[in-house]
Every structure is written in C-alpha cells, then in structure tokens.
Image (cartoon, rainbow, N blue to C red):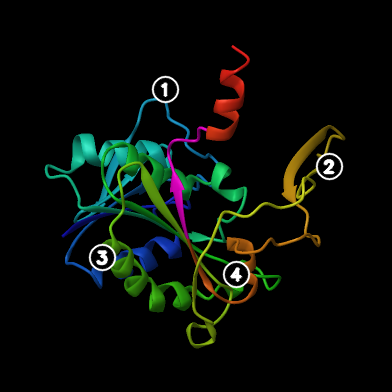
Amino acid sequence: MRILVTNDDGIHAEGLDVCVRIAQALTDDVWVVAPETDQSGVAHSLSLNDPLRLREVGERRFAVKGTPTDCVIMALRHIMEEKPALVLSGVNRGQNAAEDVTYSGTVAGAIEGTILGVPSIALSQAYGPAGRNAIHWNCAEAHGPAIVRKVLEAGIDPGILVNVNFPDCAPDQVQGTAVAMQGRRSADFLRIEPRADGRGNAYFWVGFARGKFDLGHGTDLLALSEKKISVTPLRLDMTDEPTLTRFAGLF
C-alpha cells in the first residue's frame, strides 16, 4: 500500500515525522510532500498567483513552497508516478475540531486527496494550557496505526474524508474512541488583539479566546474533553437538504 503524507505545519514539523511513523506501521511505501513553511490556517486555499517551488529533501520526501492543497496536487499530478492508496494529513500541532475544520490546512490536505479520488484521513494531536512544548505526540503515534487500520477496513466512501483528533493525554490515559459529530463553539471564540509596533503604528493578531461553552452531546469537542479519540466523517458536499427543500418552494 502506497501512502502519501502531508501536513500544514511544514516539512520540518515534529508532527509530520509522527505521521510518517504511523504510515510506516502500515507500509514501507511512504511518500512525503509537505509545505516548505508553516501553513496553519490557510484552509483549502490554492496558489494561483505564485509559482510552486519544489525541493527534494530526501528519498521520497519533498517540500513545496505552497499550501497543503498545492502539496497534494503536486504529489498526485507530478511527483508520484502511481496513485497512492491513502492520504494521511498531519499530525497537526493542536486539535482540529468543531469550526477548526473550516480553517485547517490539515483537514484541507485530506479534502484535496478526497477530491482527487484517494481515501484521506486528517490526524491532529490536541494540547492544553501547558502549551506547544508539552504536546503528547506519543498519544497519536501509539494509537494512530490502529485507528487508520480500522477506518480502512470499514472503508471510506467517495466524497467522504475522516477527521481524527487525539486527546491531550498520555497514550495509556486514553479513555476509548468516540465516533463523533463536528461540534460547535460559541460565536466569540475568535478575538482580535490590537498592538503597536516600535513606531507606534497599530497592527493586529487574530487569536483564540478560551472560555466556557456547551460542548454538545456526541461531539468531537466532548470526546476530547473526556480524553477520547474522536473520529468524525466529513462530507465534501456541503448542501443542506432540508433548506434546499424549503427554498425549492420559494423559487
């Protein structure tokens, strides 16, 4: 089985190497095509006004000066002579749950793989208040291969991708796996932080506000809070059928 590994944190990210080891637990035919630099938050963006620069980093390992979407297209349309059987995107530094999936370059890598007809799974490792220097990468690495195997055995239908999040805990503290819905946070989880540079000119950072909100029954957010691995199938077709039917009567 040939596996393509990509991510949005960049070619030198620790989570990318974790994802490679997850893939290597399944096969020895692993290819890596990842962004040259951190592309977190670029979502499913495509480079149309800038050229894609390709750099061979090692055997079956390439860096692309572009987005995760660019990387998957470059891999399938230029680098790899044979189509992979699976795309693994991640392991992301931080969870991609609830609204995160709309911003996430990690999820976008899996979206592009799905669009191009390859079963695709996004993998993310949550971390807590201790920050990026205390990430339990071993949680994703320990449980990742079994999760991927089970998903592949069950099968991924065309037009569907699978979003997997590992909880912020050691591998032996995981309380099981939950097949979960995409959650939803309160509307004020994003904030703008104004600052001033050395010359007094204003600039701004987009940030995330930590706060209390209803995690929702059966959601990925609730699963992670309970130290469970969340597995969420997502659809490329975002049509809302009840509203489609309601609007049909209007037009």
Q: In the rendered image, which quarter is residue 143 located in? A: bottom left
In this view, the mark in front (3 or 4): 3
Q: Is residue 240 visible?
A: no
Q: Is residue 17 above or below residue 209?
A: below
Instruction: Give the labeled residue for mark 1.
Output: 48
Q: Secondary structure at mark 2?
A: strand
Query: How busy is the neighbourhood of tag 4: few (under 14 within 10 Å), some, or many (20 plus)?
Result: many
Q: Which mark is residue 224?
A: 4
Q: Which mark is residue 173?
A: none
Dot 1 or dot 2: first in sequence order is 1
Q: Amino acid at mark 2?
A: Arg
Q: Which residues are magenta?
A: 232-239
Please identify the residue farthest to the top as the structure is shown. 251
Q: Amino acid at mark 4?
A: Leu
In this view, the mark in front (4 or 1): 4
Distance between the alpha carbons at the discs numbered 3 and 4: 24 Å
Instruction: Give the labeled residue for mark 3.
Output: 153
Q: Amino acid at mark 1?
A: Leu
In this view, the mark in front (4 or 2): 4
Query: How busy is the neighbourhood of tag 1: few (under 14 within 10 Å), some, or many (20 plus)?
Result: few
* Residue 195 or residue 68, whichever sits in front: 68
Q: Which mark is residue 195?
A: 2
Dot 4 or dot 2: first in sequence order is 2
